[in-house]
Image (spheres, rainbow, N blue to C red):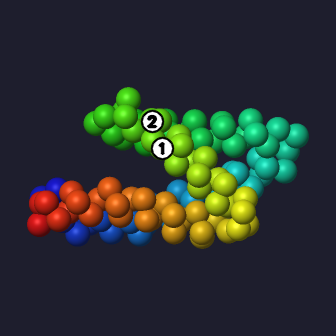
């Protein structure tokens, strides 16, 4: 993480969760749950979410199932709270739990 000692954690914990949850839960998921196929929409968006994260990962075979499950969890949070912001807080918390040990090790 040299050179990105500050940038990577800021993007991963503050920026990415807000942008992703606004897009996935706030815009797209909101539309899917009001269709005739809300379950298919939920699963479809989870696949897209997982694919995008796996493409950016050095370990896609490990990243895909984890981010697929996380997308479902974030969707449930959105359904229970009607808030993409609540999903973003959960997303940021997860990212922080992954990034913090890497950041501390490289600091």
Which of 72 and 23 lies nearest the eye of the viewer? 72
Q: Is residue 3 left or right of residue 57?
A: left
At x 33%, y 69%, the residue is 10
At x 37%, y 34%, the residue is 62
Q: Is residue 105 left or right of residue 54?
A: left
Q: Determine the image quadrant of residue 9.
A: bottom left
Judge whether residue 3 can be spotted in this image: no
At x 38%, y 29%, the residue is 61
Mark 2 residue element: helix
Q: Position of residue 79 (x, y in %)?
A: 73, 59
Query: Cβ–Cβ below 8 Å for labels 2 and 1?
Result: yes
Which of 64 and 15 lies nearest the eye of the viewer? 64
Q: Is residue 106 left or right of residue 22?
A: left
Count of labels in the image:
2
Reply above or below: 68 against 30. above
Q: Which mark is residue 29?
A: none
Q: Determine the image quadrant of residue 16.
A: bottom left
Quadrant position of the N terminus in the picture: bottom left
Residue identified by numbered label 1: 67
Mark 1, Cα crowd under 10 Å, few <14 / some 14-19 / many 20+, is many
At x 32%, y 56%, the residue is 98
List the single residue furthest toward the top.
61
Judge whether residue 73 can be spotted in this image: yes
Residue identified by numbered label 2: 64
Q: Position of residue 97 (x, y in %)?
A: 34, 61
Q: Position of residue 103 (x, y in %)?
A: 20, 62
Q: Is residue 39 left or right of residue 24?
A: right
Reply above or below: 41 against 106. above
Q: How many angstroms separate mark 2 from mark 1 (CA)?
A: 5 Å
């Amino acid at each position: 993480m040299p050179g990105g000692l500050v940038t990577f954690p800021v993007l991963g914990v503050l920026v990415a969760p807000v942008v992703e949850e606004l897009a996935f839960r706030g815009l797209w998921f909101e539309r899917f749950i009001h269709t005739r196929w809300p379950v298919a929409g939920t699963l479809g968006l989870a696949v897209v979410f997982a694919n995008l994260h796996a493409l950016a990962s050095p370990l896609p075979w490990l990243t895909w199932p984890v981010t697929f499950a996380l997308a479902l969890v974030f969707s449930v949070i959105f359904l229970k709270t009607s808030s993409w912001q609540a999903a973003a807080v959960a997303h940021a918390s997860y990212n922080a739990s992954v990034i913090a040990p890497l950041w501390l090790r490289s600091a």
